[in-house]
């Protein structure tokens, strides 16, 4: 145990101030000449900008934002579903993840009506646009909108 040493540079000697001019940190003890910061208990509070209106008072802090509670949906177009699914299959969040159309854990999906659609599929999904609904019903598909 007595042979164990800290690597070079791992330990530093404590800086001792105010012990005479020969110690390089005597006299003013590294605080500079005079002024507010040289005094004991001196200095300014955090955020003080020399009398200028500080940033925390300049920035507006009013109102309420609903941003943290926002629900985002991943848009999936009918042309992607047309390419990825065969006739008679069910389109749900699970099957979209299996086919690699949607990725992620806590993702929500909305079906959009972009592209031609001819397949007869069952949609078990949270949200579907009106245009997509028309195209699915014209192709002979079923829609089961689940609440989520």
Image (cartoon, rainbow, N blue to C red):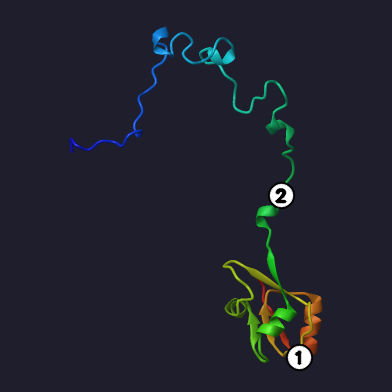
Disc number at residue 65?
Answer: 2
Disc number at residue 140?
Answer: 1
Residue 147 in view, yes or no: yes
Q: Describe residue 9's horizontal placement relative to residue 145 as left or right.
A: left
Quadrant of the snapshot with the C terminus: bottom right
Q: What x and y, as percent, mark residue 105? A: 57, 67
Local crowd at mark 2 within 10 Å, few (<14), some, or many (≥20)? few
In this picture, is 52 found above or below 101? above
CA distance separating discs 2 and 1? 43 Å
Local crowd at mark 1 within 10 Å, few (<14), some, or many (≥20)? few
Which is nearer the eye, 124 or 26?
A: 26
Q: Quadrant of residue 135?
A: bottom right
Q: Nearer the observer, disc 2 or disc 1?
A: 1
Q: Are marks 2 and 1 in contact (CB under 8 Å)?
A: no
In this picture, is 81 found above or below 21? below
Q: Describe residue 138's horizontal placement relative to residue 49 as left or right.
A: right
Q: Describe residue 15's horizontal placement relative to residue 124 as left or right.
A: left
Q: Quadrant of residue 89?
A: bottom right
Furthest toward the front, the residue is 8
- Secondary structure of the residue carrying tag 1 is loop
Which is nearer the eye, 82 or 123?
A: 82
Which is nearer the eye, 67 or 74?
A: 74
Residue that appears at 38% across and 17% down: 16
Residue 20 in view, yes or no: no
- Secondary structure of the residue carrying tag 2 is loop
Residue that appears at 77% across and 74% down: 129
């Amino acid at each position: 145990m007595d042979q164990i040493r800290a690597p070079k540079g791992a330990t530093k000697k404590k800086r001792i101030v105010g012990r005479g001019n020969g110690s390089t940190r005597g006299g003013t003890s590294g605080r500079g000449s005079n002024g507010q910061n040289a005094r004991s208990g001196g200095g300014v509070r955090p955020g003080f900008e020399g009398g200028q209106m500080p940033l925390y008072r300049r920035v507006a802090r009013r109102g309420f934002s609903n941003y943290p509670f926002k629900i985002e949906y991943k848009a999936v177009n009918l042309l992607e579903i047309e390419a990825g699914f065969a006739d008679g299959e069910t389109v749900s969040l699970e099957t979209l993840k299996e086919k690699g159309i949607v990725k992620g854990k806590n993702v929500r999906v909305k079906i959009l009506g972009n592209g031609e659609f001819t397949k007869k599929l069952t949609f078990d999904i949270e949200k579907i646009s009106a245009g997509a609904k028309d195209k699915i019903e014209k192709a002979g598909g079923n829609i089961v909108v689940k609440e989520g």
